[in-house]
Image (cartoon, coloured by chain):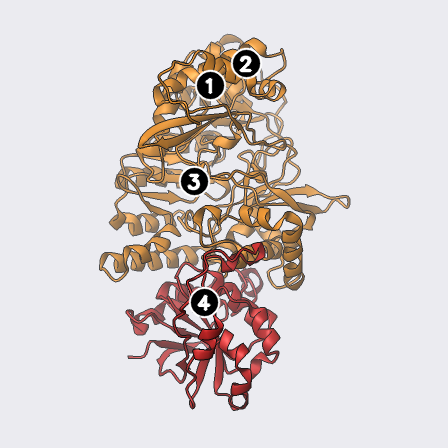
Chain colours: A orange, B red
Amino acid sequence: MYQYDEIDQQIVDERVAQYRDQTRRYLAGELTEDEFRPLRLQNGLYIQRQAPMLRIAVPYGMLSSKQLRKLGDIAKKYDKGYGHFSTRQNLQLNWPRLEDTPDILAELATVQMHAIQTSGNCIRNITTDQFVGIAPDEVIDPRAMAEIIRQWSTFHPEFALLPRKFKIAVSGTKEDRAIVQAHDIGLEFYRDANNQIAIKVWVGGGLGRTPILGTVIRDHLEWQHALTYCEAIIRVYNLHGRRDNIYKARIKILVKALGIDEFRKQVEAEWLHLKDNENTITAAELARVAKHFDAMPYETLPVQDASFEAAIAGDPAFAAWVKRCVHPHKQAGYRAVTLSLKPHGSAPGDITSEQMWAVADLADEFSFGELRSSHEQNLILADVRLSDLYALWEKARANSLATPNIGLLTDIICCPGGDFCSLANAKSIPIAEAIQLQFDNLDYLHDIGELELNISGCMNACGHHHVGHIGILGVDKDGSEWYQVTIGGKQGNDASIGNVIGPSFSADEMPNVVQKLIEVYLKERTAEERFIDTVRRLGIAPFKAHVYATKETNTEVTA
Amino acid sequence: MSRLITLKNGIAEVTTDQWTLVNLPESQVEARKQAGKVVLFKLTGEQTVTDAQIANTVIPETGNIIVPLSVFIARQQELKTRIAKGEIGVWLATHELLESLTQAWADLNSLPIIAIFVERFADGRIFSLGNLLRTRLGFKNELRAFGDVLRDQLFFLKRSGFTSFVIRADRSAEDAIASLNDFTQPYQGAVDEPRPVFKRYNRGA
């Protein structure tokens, strides 16, 4: 993975000094609360219900074992001994003291980490597919470009104070796993007719209050122009995006209001001036950065491994885990492994310091000392030998990291919700926990098959509820917490936004509502169909009918 | 104590202001909440200048002055000889269009100073305006930021082509000056240094 040189190190060190002084001025009363807010937000520090929350950047989800160990140390020393992986592949600490945050950042800088632009109205962490670099269906490994974009966007002087947050995702696979269509800019890398690296540029996607899938603004962009083209897009947005209404300030609103044709016209006109300027990426720079992402020193291994086959045959629990948590790899004899941060009955994405240290050890022992975080809030060891899987599984299981539920109903994507977040309308973690416990029977869970259930505690949609096969959104009705259910959302190349099935539910109804949806699916499905396929074939009507037919009458009637 | 920081040949210092800022009188018309036209999002909720305001703006008879864009456009005839003498600068608010200025006055470099008023710290349009004035419109003279200008914008303003900064009245310019050098080697090319770090520094192969 990318290693800092003296330039990168100097920038994070200078950032620590700058932020330390900003915090000092705030605590000394030289900055008001309002003045400090945009400054601390640009450094990932929110003031939450109980305490500040610090969001630490994990650029495009890549972590070294050394970094994860340090995160475990920091969570132990400055927090309550755990952290939370977010849907932006970042790590959040829920209980640090504001006074300690400069020291936390100084410690992060010692392992080439930071919290720069993890929040605020600026270009956020670049995200991508967690199987980047090793996926069999990958056409281009976009990490070098992601790193180049990360550097370009870090303290970009023109785009430091945008109308609203700005999210960029990159992807280089046939099957999109980075939800590029749900980003302000999505960059889809491919090889063009001349076998050159090219980019399909999506713009104006985003979840939040107004979920909109992105539109293609340019089918073919040569990779050299990635930065200048983004500059053109973001300049048009910076100048013309709304700043009077926070709910209408994302680029998607501007794109919709102007129409994609007019927006494209303005961007292309701007780009004519920027094209080929100094920020054009050189082949030398791409090569320099790409070297950091060279393939691991893999051994030449056979496609099959007898001990692995024997373990599968002899241990059904291991076989179940392999089925769900082990993924194909482009190198023969290797697999990627997802360590589930979704054990049933606990907060999705949470991880203790002890678990972080354990995962760091597993990465060192089995996967070249590196790992990834996913937007589904799990951790991935990307390069594990087939013959090591059983040993890895035993150790992961001993640390509660081997729940065989990846891609299943209980692999819930969930924001921190009303337990922590001051934006939330409703709690989300207890809903996730209750649903996990309702579906705790693993055989039943595996029979239901692939299903993505996403929960957000408010319409800001950090839990990506719009693109969940089942989406749950916390809403506030006269001060009490209710939950609106959507079905039919999906991420991927054929992404879609879910449809609301009807009036919302109280918290204690939710496990049963999900149960009812599953009952309809199990009754109606054909042999090949996943939940999402059945919903797409039948529409929401039969699901709605079953859920509400049996619904007790004491719940509210308005939508 | 002067609140003006001036950047000359890379050296920043607190200096005495040679310019007097001319403001529009308060509007008697209620601010329009909706401008209506989709393309002009930037006007939404923001005040537009009335003819009465322009007519009633008091322009000092002598001295170096920076006048509002709307006054500069509407009362150009009155100002012509003083423009020729280099006594007149123009200021724009962040929602105003650079095209309005260039349509009214093509030769920007005959203006010794252009200033941009930023009403709120969080309004980052000022950076794009600075960039466009320097890189697109070729403006070479003093480019000033004033309004809600605090030390934590200075590094970005400098990189966006600004060369002078009026720090908000309740803050010290002496303290703020240090933030112009918050970072030694920024990653990306911008107005002050068009080359990104990978073109100006050998980062190895």
Q: Could you tell me which secondary element the residue under label 4 belongs to?
A: helix
Measure how far apart labels 2 and 3 are at the Cα level. Answer: 34 Å
User: Disc 2 and disc 4: Cα gap in Å?
Assistant: 57 Å
Which residue shows up at 72% across the image and 47% down it? A196
- Name the spot of residue A166 as percent of width and height, x first: 50, 48
Q: Is residue A108 left or right of residue A320?
A: left
Same chain for mark 1 and mark 2? The answer is yes
Q: Could you tell me which secondary element the residue under label 3 belongs to?
A: loop
Marks 2 and 3 close (CB-CB < 8 Å): no
Residue bearing mark 1: A404
Q: Chain of mark 3?
A: A
Sequence-first disc among 1 and 2:
1
- Whether the residues at callouts 1 and 2 have beta carbons within 8 Å, the answer is no
Sequence-wise, the earlier of marks 2 and 3 is: 3
Q: Residues within 10 Å of mark 1 (few under 14, many from 20)?
A: many
- Circles 4 and 1 in contact, beta carbons < 8 Å: no
Q: Amino acid at mark 3?
A: Asn
Q: Amino acid at mark 2?
A: Tyr
Q: Earlier in the sequence, mark 1 or mark 3?
A: 3
Q: Which residue is mark 3?
A: A90
Kindly identify the amino acid type of the residue bearing the numbered disc 4. Leu
Camera-side mark, 2 or 3: 2
Q: Amino acid at mark 1?
A: Pro
Closer to viewer: mark 2 or mark 4 = 2
Q: Which residue is mark 2?
A: A521
